[in-house]
Amino acid sequence: MEQQKWIVTVVLAFIVAMLPFTFRILESHQVQHLYMGELTNMIFGKLGGWASSNHHDLSIDKAASKVIGPNLTACHPSYGRPDLLVYCCPAGFETPGPFVDFQFPDPKSPLRVRRPAHLLDENYIAKYNKALSIMKSLPYDDPRNFVRQANLHCLFCTGAYEQQNSDTPLNIHRTWLFFPWHRMMIYFHERIIGSLVGDDTFALPVWTWDIPEGMMIPDFYVNRSLTFFHSERDFSHFPPQMADLNYVSDRNLSPEDQLDTNLAFMYSQMVSGARKTELFMGCTYKANEGYCNAPGTVESAPHNTLHTWIGSNLNPGREDMGKFYSAAKDPIFYAHHSNIDRLWEVWREIHNHQLDIKDPDWLDSFCLFYDENLKLVKIKVRDVLDITKLGYSYEEVDRPWLEKRPSPSVPPKFARQILKLKENEKQFQLSGNHVSSSDFGSQGRALDTSLTIKVNRSKDHSIKREKEEEETIVVHGIEVKGDAYVKFDVYVNLIDETIISPKFREFAGTFAHIPGGGEMMKRKINLKLGVSELLKDLEADQDESIWVTLLPRTTSCSNVTIEGIQIEYIK
Ligand code: C2O
């Protein structure tokens, strides 16, 4: 008891000392709806949590459950950027009140058909516009309020909540919760919008950036007289500018070239690079199992890259879309995420649902959301795996990228001769089976310039390896210092660093990283790229080793270190 008092005193003294600093940050326009009462709550809420944590939740055997879910009573300030404390917690969070378990909507209710945004007519746009205005005008203590909706994203991506079965903050990016969590969020959002205008057929628009007709920002999002217009965007990317799905900086490709590049890129991210569950879904994230920080292909890009592409070039983190704490304040977030959600379905379909995750810890992971009737609902991942049962569907959209399998930039035989020559001339520094920290130095290797590494493949790669195994390049222990957007690309058997594009088969994938979220988000990241098909196309599948080039695409890569690179076989 004595000790507790002592801790409380020290913490209080610290808070008092920090108050001027805190207020300076809280004054920022990006931090909304914080007033004195909430500040007191947040300080004492957190303190109470710390002081009493020994005798909290004794009924839950914390170590036993590996299911991930938020502890709604433990909301606290978090970092949107390292220099920006944000507070996204709802008022009164310490007593979230009773919740109900999720129930599927009545199967007799009409199906909500999500249609491509560029096909939507004036009636639809008018209705959605009206609903959004209503949403924006609701008071902040109504969970249907637009900022409250947007803050849901802030809460779960900056670690504002602790997990229920462990004391670590919960994070929904770069893990296998990415797809189901965002599905839950926009599911409730869609139903709230529908109910605000009394339309139970209302469905979110889909920004289908993966087909030629959808590669520009849909018109109604840039119409200044509508609520979809948002000022915190990069205006140079407004139509007729075509989206760059592998965006890093403006490259001014011709529209034809951009289109081809986008489609080839989609092929890598959806098809050849995503032939195993983990490669598409992201890493296995369980309570009390430590570390999981590896995004799936589509999450890295086009998901992250388009967040960055939309966000304003005038803001430090390309807010709003460029940072997760602010992203959902831009109405286009929801159309972007319907497409992400649709692509999850497309991927499942391509694999006849054979690659769906069956692990109960994933199926039982959960979150809580307010529904259109203001009820707090506990919803599990297993509840969101059948979209028909959820009462919505996607209008059929072409998949032109399925046919866009890239081809080598130079004939593979020729490339190999050049690579051998370069090897003899000792143009590459590193090689080995598992090029690891020992070769990279104890601090890891900085990516201030491009790095080519010869990686040996397993001796039995051609004979004993089972057909179904996916050969995977693993860049491990990626550490991002600082806050800038970071992107590097990975190529295999590349002979000329000036001839690069996802249009060429040498492109193996990308690391496109949006930092943010304070300490816990700084954990090291692994990048896994499936390359079996690529190696076949480069005629390298019988070779003993391959050359892997890491190509920095942002100057911020000088703040990135990697610990090693190796080849793994995923069953
Ligand atoms: Cu949670 Cu598009 O990000």
Image (cartoon, helix red, strand yellow):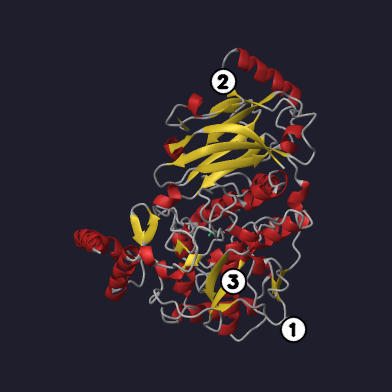
Horizontal and vertical percent for residue 306?
Answer: 56, 54
The structure residue drawn at horizontal position 78% and vertical position 47%, both measured from the top left corner, is 403
The residue pinned by badge 2 equals: 428
Alpha carbons under labels 1 and 3: distance apart: 21 Å
Element class at badge 2: loop
Mark 1 vs ligand 1: CB under 8 Å?
A: no
Alpha carbons under labels 1 and 2: distance apart: 64 Å
Sequence-first disc among 1 and 3: 1
Residue 85 visible, this angle: yes
Residue 170 drawn above or below residue 137: above
Q: Amino acid at mark 1?
A: Lys
Tell me which corner region of the image, top left, top right, bottom left or bottom right, holds residue 110: bottom right
In-image side of 343 versus 303 (left or right): right
Sequence-first disc among 1 and 2: 1
In the picture, the disc for residue 337 is none
Element class at badge 1: loop
Alpha carbons under labels 2 and 3: distance apart: 51 Å
Q: Nearer the viewer, mark 2 or mark 3?
A: 3
In the picture, the disc for residue 108 is 1
Q: Amino acid at mark 2?
A: Phe
Q: Quadrant of ligand 1?
A: bottom right
The residue pinned by badge 3 equals: 379
Q: Nearer the viewer, residue 477 or 402?
A: 477
Viewport quadrant of the N terminus: bottom left
Circle 1/circle 3 CB separation < 8 Å: no
Element class at badge 3: strand
Tell me which corner region of the image, top left, top right, bottom left or bottom right, holds residue 209: bottom right
Horizontal and vertical percent for residue 514?
Answer: 48, 50
Horizontal and vertical percent for residue 430?
Answer: 55, 22
